[in-house]
Image (tube, coloured by chain):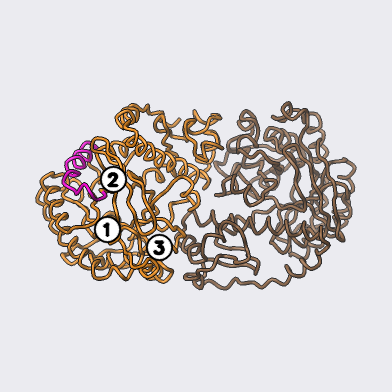
Chain colours: A brown, B orange
Amino acid sequence: MSLTFSVQQTSGTARRATVQLPHGPVETPIFMPVGTAGTVKAVPQNVLEEVGTQILLGNTYHLYLRPGHERIRRLGGLHQFISWPHPILTDSGGFQVFSLNQLRKVTPDGVQFRSHLDGSSHFFSPEHSMEVQIALGADIVMVFDECTEYPASRERARESLQLTMQWARRSRDYFLTHAQEVPWFAAFDGRTQNLFGIVQGGMYPELRRESAERLVELDLPGYAIGGLSVGEPRQHTREIIESTLPLLPADRPRYVMGVGYPEEIVEYAAMGVDMMDCVIPTRAARHGLLFTSEGRMNIKNLRYAEDRNPPDPACNCMVCQRYTRAYLRHLAMTQEPLGGALNSVHNLSIYLDTMRSVRDAIGRGTLPELLSRVRGRIDVHAPSA
Amino acid sequence: MSLTFSVQQTSGTARRATVQLPHGPVETPIFMPVGTAGTVKAVPQNVLEEVGTQILLGNTYHLYLRPGHERIRRLGGLHQFISWPHPILTDSGGFQVFSLNQLRKVTPDGVQFRSHLDGSSHFFSPEHSMEVQIALGADIVMVFDECTEYPASRERARESLQLTMQWARRSRDYFLTHAQEVPWFAAFDGRTQNLFGIVQGGMYPELRRESAERLVELDLPGYAIGGLSVGEPRQHTREIIESTLPLLPADRPRYVMGVGYPEEIVEYAAMGVDMMDCVIPTRAARHGLLFTSEGRMNIKNLRYAEDRNPPDPACNCMVCQRYTRAYLRHLAMTQEPLGGALNSVHNLSIYLDTMRSVRDAIGRGTLPELLSRVRGRIDVHAPSA
């Protein structure tokens, strides 16, 4: 593996650090935009760079189905295929296999599932997930796990965890013997990808503990907390993160998968989370929901129809520098593709600026003030007229 | 009115000129991207600037329906509403009233029609079209005309032309007495919009002649040839343009509406056309059809699935500088919104670069060579696999 993690500053449980990856450094705490099928929907790569994206997330499940991992391997890997020369992380495909498939069949060996696109039959095992992720060639790859559904009984969560632990070990074993097959291995002087483990265990702290302890034995370069944002109350999410983080090695990156709202990513970073990803900023954008320094804004609301202010007067993004709420509302109401694109650029800017503020605040020792400011945000969202 | 037109160079029937408009100069011959509802679908305004857009076309019909011309007037006019401080031209709404409505009712007074969005009933007269266009506040506005359908008998085309001529006069009369109502009148030291006439007459040269002669009597600052690209053979389009152009004043801009393919816009510019607009580059882009220096390319074709070349190796646009055919094919096949956006940027670049080459060639006296190069293009489009 080939990651270095160096903590520069701490502030309580939070830390500011640099993760050195084959395709460049990542300053943490960081939010990762989600580029599902090799594209952050509607946002071109140069704009992702302009808003400060350091690392992109790609979805293994989607890329495996289209255009196929072998095709991407022949094209030099995901970085070259999507023209993104900076760091990338891929998930294991597990989350989508479980969330997009009603007819999946789980065995100790792996998961049989049908494509959500054409119903064709596929099989993912830990070994196959790793094979696909090695072909994609992200800087960080994830063990294949079962994302435990919510709610789940303790018995069910324990069984699911046992499977996940076996799969984590098989993922690691396959990865260690095939890591040199990554498309850019030769070009990067033999540096390889980095395999992260995923803590599961549902909403049961003692299962989370067991999961974390057994994963740490695998001596992986980074650890994620998975199985959150699956429908549980927010308070549970927070408690699981808070109780699990101290069980993970402090000298390695800690990643919480699939979170969250702007207030939440600040809060989790303050707890000591280094990496986060979520579809919220882009998905919300396509539905006309903007995040601003004052709170959330439903841009379709009639109150904005003749509002010549920028979406967020405190925001310096390219959207807020040029366009009005009235124009963005018009684009949303007419379902013009530019609307979702501009809203996405703004929301991503807010998320990435937020994490930049967190890093700055850790550096200056002002994180508590930032936290209380974020918690005090007024919600400017109003019922649609 | 407030337009100046100065011819710098000529080459045969072609001329290179500058049209000075309230919101800036336009170098002709020029192609105008179509921003139907106040947006060139999926392309942000800064990118329109980067690819060299000098003047945008807005559709009066669409903007009248959403967000409404009075709203745009209150927001300072179309330039401010869409954050486009450069020249804009609006059509009269006539073309869409006729092409998007099966149940329209035409009387000498105007046209009763139903919204293609919600079936609501509306009425457009020459006076109302001008009122709407004045509220939108484009630099160039068009008389309200009936776009004669194809095919049309000589009798039908003559009747339609009579109506169009009455409407042109009424458009002018209304415009002259209301021109000071444009939203930016005071801010621009009393400069106003410019009203262009539209030659109709179907595919009948003698009707086209009558139309042109009677329009010229109205002493308008520019003239368009309308009623083309309505399904007629290309050869007819070319003949009508060729025979009508000499009937229009050489000291005023000449605009052919709704054309064409890249080869055609070069050819028409060589005939002496100064301005053109068309949805082809953006509409084709959304369907995966790219224009290149070598001809047309259906990017969905399987042959491009692992093609790491840029869409057009001879093109310097931001898309060709960064992305491969393989990636654009993937975006098209997965119907990702970024695909239509990037294809649109490339196609618009090709169109605007083409017109830049035409202007350069007129200046250097090499237009004949450019023309024969363009006519000799190989079509790289192949049947979809």
Label 1 to label 3: alpha-carbon separation:
15 Å
Residue plotted at (39% across, 49% down): B33
Q: Can residue A276 be seen from the camera position used here? A: yes
Q: Residue A236 appears at what percent x and percent y? A: 78, 63
Residue to which mark 2 is pinned: B7
Give x and y (percent) for residue B289. 42, 38
Which corner quadrant holds the N terminus of chain A?
A: top right
Q: Do tags 3 and 2 sit on the same chain? A: yes
Mark 3 or 2 closer to N-term? Answer: 2
Residue A240 is at least partly visible in this image: no
Q: What residue type is labelled 3?
A: Leu
- Which element is circle 3 on? helix
Classify residue B218 by image quadrant. Answer: bottom left
- The image shows residue A371 at horizontal and vertical percentages of 77, 66
Q: Which amino acid does label 2 sit on?
A: Val
Question: Which span is picked out in magenta?
Answer: B234-253
Could you classify mark 3 by the number of other residues whose Cα lies within 10 Å: few (under 14), some (14-19), or many (20 or more)?
A: many
In the image, which disc is placed on residue B142? 1
Which circle, 2 or 1, is nearer the viewer?
Answer: 2
Cβ atoms at labels 1 and 3 below 8 Å apart: no
Q: How far apart are marks 2 and 1 (CA)?
A: 22 Å
The answer to which of marks 1 and 3 sits earlier in the sequence is 3
A12 within the magenta span: no
Q: Given contact means CB atoms under 8 Å apart, are the residues at marks 3 and 2 in contact?
A: no
Question: Tag 2, which chain?
Answer: B
Q: Distance between the residues labelled 3 and 2?
A: 29 Å
When the figure is inspected, residue A45 is found, relative to residue B165, above or below; the finding is above
Check the residue under mark 3 and report the chain it is in.
B
